[in-house]
Image (tube, helix red, strand yellow):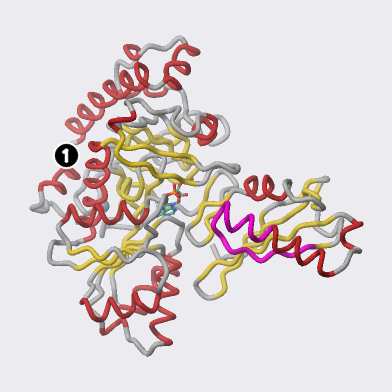
């Protein structure tokens, strides 16, 4: 049965706008942001001119298909500020996410953009039932990664008491949960399972703790993980989705109605396209999520190809919200891996390996999950000369690669040097990723 009771918080009431009113707002914002992008972002001026397109050509929401797509590579090629549309003095924050090769992609925010981000993250937490009575610990990293700051700002906006713990330091986190009466945690789902294991080893029963909500995102997670987390701790789990390019965590959030999430489409306009052809697909079809930022001023992104595969439905949800509903995100249309919450492209590893003397560019990335945490092994072939060389030479080569990966990508990977020709090829090509984690 549909829940018609709207929450009292004015922020949450935005989730219940009637569709015609919402669509009018989206169109008004779309027109403004398209004009802004065209007039102030050199990248979009060029892209529009190349298509002979003017902002006035966008006469209704459906005209969005006339706009050019934006890809991750566009952010990389225009690194670091080429997509910005405001003077540097108006930019108050930078974050970054991994690009497809060595350099990260940089995202800029104005003060107003940070406001919007806080608002949508807050709406996500309110949807899950957080109030100003809650004590929330943030277990995402506070860094260039958007997780820590994004969740932090959203919780502050709700008015909860926020503990900026950051990633890692699991034993201390267990202590904080117990001593400070923490009711809510935000972290990656795999880190939470790790936390459960550590708590058990320490003899702490999380079921008896004050913890009652967990907001998990930044990587895909399964129903099995959800059950394990809820049964093991008695908390209610909530999904939270976002990506740095668009804003950060809080682009979409889970409701009580069903698995999946509502997209805050008054700020982020979603489409589903065929990942191969780029053609827009009707509601209900599975395809690649494409997002347009409707009111992000520092770095507006039009029709950004997320590579996340999902489905959208527009029928009013059983929770009463009118916002579009998106299926949980379980896979991508590209080869990006998320290992311990860190985005990783095989091409990034390849670019690093090619800098190392004695390495043949035949490699594979093997991802496993031992207990809760992901492990990455990089198996790479060395030249025949080197393979016959002394153990100490191979050992220093192994260390060199390991350090490079740690410093560029931030992951401690196990490096295995293998004999030339030992990595399987199909039709002459190496399959670069072997993901053994349970889907
Ligand atoms: P980043 O830009 O580092 O925040 O990474 C964004 C990517 O992380 C997204 O495009 C998704 O592939 C993934 N991601 C983020 N949140 C979720 C979630 N709740 N479920 C599944 N994947 C997610
Ligand atoms: Zn709902």
User: Which sits in the foreground, 210 or 276?
Assistant: 210
383 lies left or right of 106:
right
| Quarter the N terminus occupies | bottom left
**Could you tell me residue 64's position as x and y percent?**
37, 23
| Residue at 89%, 64% in the rendered image | 389
Q: Is residue 249 above or below residue 314?
A: below
Q: Is residue 248 left or right of residue 431?
A: left
Question: Residue at 39% across / 72% down in the picture?
Answer: 227
Residue at image position (26%, 81%) is: 178
| Dot 1 beta carbon under 8 Å from ligand 2 | no
Give coordinates of residue 59: x percent, y percent.
Answer: 30, 15
Magenta residue check for 22: no
Residue at image position (91%, 57%) is 385
Give coordinates of residue 314: x percent, y percent: 30, 41
Quadrant in which the C terminus is drawn: bottom right
- Corner quadrant of residue 265: top left
Q: Which residues are magenta?
A: 401-417
Of residues 221 and 165, the one nearer the viewer is 165
Seen in the picture, residue 306 relative to 220 is either above or below; the reply is above
- Dot 1: few (<14), some (14–19), or many (≥20) neighbours within 10 Å? some
Residue that badge 1 annotates = 17
Which quadrant of the figure has residue 42? top left
Q: Considering only vertical position in the picture, is 221 above or below 7?
A: below
Q: How many marks?
A: 1
Furthest-left residue in this view: 8
């Amino acid at each position: 049965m549909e829940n018609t009771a709207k929450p009292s918080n004015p922020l949450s009431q935005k989730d219940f706008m009637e569709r015609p009113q919402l669509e009018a707002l989206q169109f008004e914002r779309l027109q403004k942001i398209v004009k802004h992008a065209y007039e102030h972002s050199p990248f979009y001026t060029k892209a529009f001119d190349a298509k002979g397109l003017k902002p006035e050509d966008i006469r209704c929401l459906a005209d969005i298909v006339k706009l050019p797509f934006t890809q991750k590579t566009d952010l990389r090629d225009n690194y670091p500020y080429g997509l910005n549309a405001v003077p540097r003095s108006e930019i108050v924050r930078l974050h970054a996410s991994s690009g497809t090769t060595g350099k990260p992609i940089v995202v800029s925010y104005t003060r107003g953009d940070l406001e919007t981000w806080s608002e949508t993250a807050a709406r996500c937490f309110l949807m899950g039932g957080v109030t100003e009575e809650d004590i929330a610990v943030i277990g995402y990293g506070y860094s260039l990664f958007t997780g820590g700051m994004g969740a932090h700002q959203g919780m502050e906006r709700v008015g909860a008491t926020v503990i900026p713990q950051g990633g890692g330091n699991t034993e201390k986190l267990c202590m904080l949960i117990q001593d400070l009466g923490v009711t809510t945690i935000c972290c990656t789902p795999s880190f939470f399972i790790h936390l459960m294991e550590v708590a058990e080893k320490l003899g702490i029963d999380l079921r008896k703790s004050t913890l009652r909500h967990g907001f998990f995102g930044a990587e895909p997670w399964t129903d099995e993980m959800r059950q394990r987390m809820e049964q093991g701790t008695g908390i209610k789990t909530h999904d939270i989705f976002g990506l740095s390019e668009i804003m950060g965590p809080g682009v979409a959030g889970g409701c009580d109605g069903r698995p999946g999430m509502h997209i805050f489409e008054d700020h982020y306009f979603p489409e589903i396209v065929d990942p191969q052809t780029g053609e827009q697909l009707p509601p209900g079809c599975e395809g690649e999520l494409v997002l347009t930022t409707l009111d992000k001023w520092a770095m507006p992104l039009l029709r950004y190809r997320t590579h996340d595969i999902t489905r959208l439905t527009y029928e009013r949800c059983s929770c009463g919200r009118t916002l579009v509903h998106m299926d949980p995100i379980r896979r991508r249309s590209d080869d990006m891996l998320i290992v311990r919450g860190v985005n990783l492209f095989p091409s990034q590893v390849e670019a690093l390996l090619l800098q190392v003397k004695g390495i043949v560019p035949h490699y594979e990335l093997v991802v496993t999950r031992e207990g809760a945490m992901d492990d990455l092994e990089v198996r790479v072939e060395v030249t025949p000369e080197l393979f016959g060389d002394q153990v100490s030479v191979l050992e220093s080569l192994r260390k060199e690669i390991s350090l490079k990966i740690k410093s560029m990508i931030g992951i401690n990977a196990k490096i295995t040097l293998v004999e030339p020709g030992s990595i399987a090829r199909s039709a002459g090509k190496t399959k670069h990723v072997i993901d053994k984690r349970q889907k």
